[in-house]
Amino acid sequence: MAIKIQNITKQFGDFRAVDDVSFEIEHGQLVAVLGPSGSGKSTILRIIAGLETPDSGEVFLTGEEATDIPIQERNVGFVFQHYALFKHMTVWDNVAFGLEVRKVPKEKIQSRVDELLKLVQLSGYSRRYPSQLSGGQRQRVALARALAPEPKVLLLDEPFGALDSKVREELREWLRRLHDEMHVTSLFVTHDQEEALEVSDKVVIVNKGKIEQIGSPQEVYKHPKTPFVTSFIGPVNVVPGRLFGSHDETTYVRPHEIDLTYDVPEGKGGKVLPALVRRLNHVGANVKVDLELADGNTLQVHLTPERLSELSLVEGEQVFVSPKEMKVFTEDYTI
Amino acid sequence: MAEKKLFSFSEKGAKLRVVLISVVVLYIGVLVVAPLSALVRAVLLSDVGSLGKVLLQPDVFYAFGLTLALALAAVVLNTFFGLIVAWVMVRHHFPGKKFLNGLIDLPFAVSPVVVGYVLFLLFGRDGWFGSLDNWIGIPILFSWPSMLAATVFVSLPFVIREVMPVLQEIGTDQDQASYTLGANQWQTFWRVLLPSIRWGLLYGMTLTFARSLGEFGAVFVVSGAITQQTETATLFIYRSVEEREYLAGYSVALILAGLSFCILFLIEYLKKKEEKRLTHGH
Amino acid sequence: MKTGKSRLLSRSLRITAITYLVVMLVLPLLALFSDSLSEGIVSFWKNMSQPVALHALKLTLITASVMAVVNAIMGTITAYVLTRYSFFGKSLLSSLVDIPFAIPTLVTGVMLVILYGPNGVVGTWLKEVFNLQVVFAPTGILLALLFVGLPYVVRSVQPVLHEVDVDQEEAASTMGASTWLTFRRVLFPALRPAILSGTLLSFARALGEFGSVVVVAGNIPMYSQTASVYIMGEIESQNQVAASSMSVVLLTLSFATILFVDWYTRDKSLEAGEVPEVAEV
């Protein structure tokens, strides 16, 4: 195991930021810790780095107990949310810093820094200062700086949080490729489910200081274990009461896992519901259809443009709703 | 109609502008420029020979030497302790912090005479530290230790007050980054923290130096003003004026004023540099 | 982070800081207060109610107050001119404003005596034409205090003026408000805290001013002797209780002023949403 944390708890005043959290990460994986803001995900990352001390629990890095090892000796690479580049140093000096404080020989520093700057595609920028770089470039310098001392694990706190959406997408693809090249065990924190699902090998979903689910992106998307995960990962229709059956349950259906028909499809007897088409929205790759069920609940369905033209739907029409996939949780779950 | 109003306003505005600028120029002219030129004129009107004679007195050299030594020592002490105090005030939490923080401004408020007098009380024969001089073997009152204490006291807030906001602003990210990269606290201080606060610190040190150079009241009380022993530049000026040795007093005053100007320009330069760094930093 | 070594360092830094402040600031304060009350509150009162002491205190308060009022008005105008207008020699004027911060106050006193003294050009002229004696009189004290206090209001108002949009003023004046009304209703409320804190700081400073005053005032008891010069005299004549009593009064007045400013401005900055505390390391 590259990283293992066991029963970690951390309290700030009255606020329990991390509540008995345990998980393991294998060598070479790229793992996302996903959760809304205030869920304790950054605190977990900072505890692994040694920037915070847990109230209880243990941290293991590459198999060794690291809970009481000072930050300096943990040899983790940390990329801060706002990069925390040294403003008074050039790009080159920033990347070289971790090697210089370890008294690595000069020639070795030179070649390692050059290699890293090439890797992050900033070779021509070595003499610039952080203030002369764009957000994306700063992010890459921060990454190169964290990688320079060849850390055992790489930790990234909201690595793309401060960037605009276009740069963000480019960078996360790039991070994935970089990771495939370097194979450094990496753990990153994000509140963006799309980012987590797209980039990582494994997702740890946290909410209110607790782990909700751990699994591959496929798993957490296809088989969410809790109402929180279901509604946090991707758009979902939340319908109070069971769509087909008893009352004290809530049904979760993803908008694109619903089909619409004019007639009751054969063999699907009890699994369809009548509904009224309220509104069609053609913006984006899918057409969004707002429906009203007989009991007054609303439902959103995403259809491909092809399916829509097959159906030739009109607002105000009556249709039948047939969910292809749905999740039912008993009601005492709160989201 | 609206246009006319705007026009009349701007005409009125132009008139107001001339009036206000004239008032300010006149005020600062009378208050600052006139006395300064009077001092320059008084010194320049004298002949070079007598000017050279008064300035080459050993008393003058001694006084300047002592003033510089005291000011430099005050800068060293207040930089060292000021950095620690600023750090603790920004990064630590402890009961009584607010009280201490308010107290830091005390030297800005206290009359220099009172400062001197308090030291006089502390180190005097019946004072709380009255026997300290026997103990360490050198005299404190009417000697350099109490003069240094007075100088350090009056210039205490500058480094602290300049460094605190800078420390506040840079936050903890950069030193945490430094730790994760394997640097120890010593390396982090010298290579990350100190360079980040250097302009604020330098600015505070310059202010400390300027304030120390010109200190008069507190040093006057504790020094005894003994020629060539405890006589600083300001004490020399005072004695000269009292003894009607006007040329000596005025010329040393002019040199001290000149020194202050140089420091003032240095401060303005540092300020610009700091502003540039701030706008650059975005 | 909180390993044994770093905790030790952190603790020793804190102890050093607190010890330094206590030795340098708290101890002297305690010494002064205990000395002034060493012979009881009665002798403290007796000393303070002597005519010479009372007059010195009164003169100090009056000159400092007059200075504060003049300084508030002229400082605000100066700040306005320096931020809103551009004209030839502006940066020189701006540098001149800082001179009183840099120049030793004793030198200030000497300069004023040269100019306005009995042998000075302006001094003789004023004496002959208006029969006005500036130096060795309360007027000289006022002049010295004005010089020393000049930068305080200007430098505290300037940044605020920078923040206030010219648009607001222009909007008010296009709505037909007169210049005076614009100032009173739009600009002044925004500037008031800065003017007040600058003025009070210069007032506190003026209460204790010594170097310039001792040269300019002539120090005639019951006429031109200020509180700090009075203390000096009492020290020289070894009248400790008198010196201590006046010191306590002076220190209390000026420190209370400074603390008020501190509290007043901090309150404002908190309202503006600043978060002053950073996590402890």
Image (tube, helix red, strand yellow):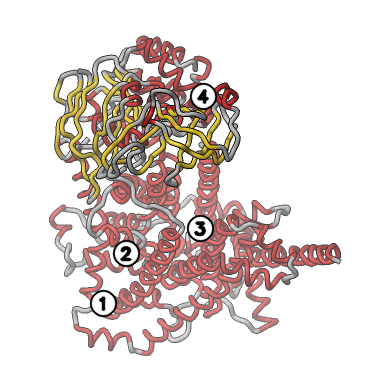
- How dense is the environment of label 4, judged by Cα within 10 Å: few (below 14), some, or many (20 and up)? some
Chain at numbered mark 1: C
Q: Nearer the viewer, residue B103 or C194?
A: C194
**Residue at the image position 18 percent from the left and 67 percent from the top:** B127
Residues C72 and B6: in front is B6
Task: Report the amino acid beneath label 3.
Answer: Ile
Mark 2 is on which residue type?
A: Gly
* Mark 1 surroundings within 10 Å by alpha-carbon count, few (fewer than 14), some (14 through 19), many (20 or more): some
Residue wearing tag 1: C240
Give the position of the C terminus of chain C as an image quadrant. top left
- Please tell me how crowded label 2 is: few (under 14), some (14-19), or many (20+) other residues with Cα within 10 Å: some
Check the residue under mark 3 and report the chain it is in: C
Q: Calculate the distance from the C-alpha at mark 2 to the C-alpha at mark 3.
A: 23 Å
Is B194 on the left-hand or right-hand side of C178? Answer: left
Quarter of the image that includes the N terminus of chain C: top left
In the rendered structure, find residue A128 and report the number of the disc placed on it: 4
Indicate the quadrant where residue A93 lies: top left
